[in-house]
Image (cartoon, helix red, strand yellow):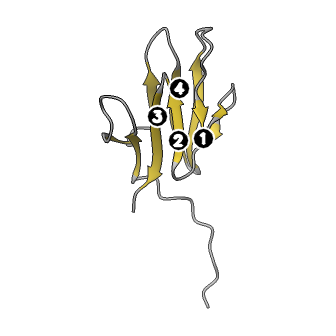
Amino acid sequence: LEPKIDRPPRLDGARLQILNGKSAGRELPLVKESVKLGKAGAEIVQINKRPDGHFIVYLEQSGNKSEPRINGQHLGSRAVKLHNHDVIEINRLKIEYYLAG
């Protein structure tokens, strides 16, 4: 038996897939070090690539009542590590994070 080595996750296949709205089904590969989602004056989140995974952080709080969520939980002001098949909700859009391959 080979010893099990904890390797960092393979991030080169990470993608976002839009689950609803006009762009449903569209995929966005996460190839850059950081990606911003949202629009000015509304909710904006940023997904940052780190050696141990992708982390999402809420950048702009416009004072409106809705707030980005991960799997139904409010994102808040902390950076949250994304896991395979997490669902991000931002500006009424649902986006799934997943690791391909």
Q: Are marks 3 and 1 in contact (CB under 8 Å)?
A: no
Q: Give the SS element for disc 3.
A: strand
The residue lying at 52 percent from left, 53 percent from top is 84
Instruction: Name the disc covering residue 45, or none.
Output: 4
Query: Does label 2 or label 3 sit earlier along the sequence?
Result: 2
Q: Are marks 1 and 2 in contact (CB under 8 Å)?
A: yes
Q: The disc labelled 3 sits on which kind of residue?
A: Lys
Question: Which residue is identified by label 2?
Answer: 87
Mark 2, residues whose alpha carbon is within 10 Å: few (<14), some, or many (≥20)? many
State the quadrant of the C terminus.
bottom left
Extreme residue toward the bottom, this view: 1
Mark 3, residues whose alpha carbon is within 10 Å: few (<14), some, or many (≥20)? many
Choose between 40 and 25: the one closer to the eye: 25
Q: The disc labelled 2 sits on which kind of residue?
A: Val
Task: Give percent across and percent down for residue 96.
Answer: 46, 43
Q: Give the SS element for disc 1.
A: loop
Q: Are marks 4 and 2 in contact (CB under 8 Å)?
A: no
The residue lying at 33 percent from left, 37 percent from top is 24
Q: Are marks 2 and 3 in contact (CB under 8 Å)?
A: yes
Choose between 1 and 85: the one closer to the eye: 85
Question: Which residue is identified by label 1?
Answer: 71
Choose between 37 and 95: the one closer to the eye: 95
Q: Give the SS element for disc 2.
A: strand
Residue 17 versus residue 66 in the image, above or below: below
Task: Give percent across and percent down for residue 63.
Answer: 62, 8
Query: Does label 4 or label 3 sit earlier along the sequence?
Result: 4
The residue lying at 59 percent from left, 25 percent from top is 58
Q: Give the SS element for disc 4.
A: strand
Q: The disc labelled 1 sits on which kind of residue?
A: Asn
Instruction: Name the disc covering residue 94, or none.
Output: 3
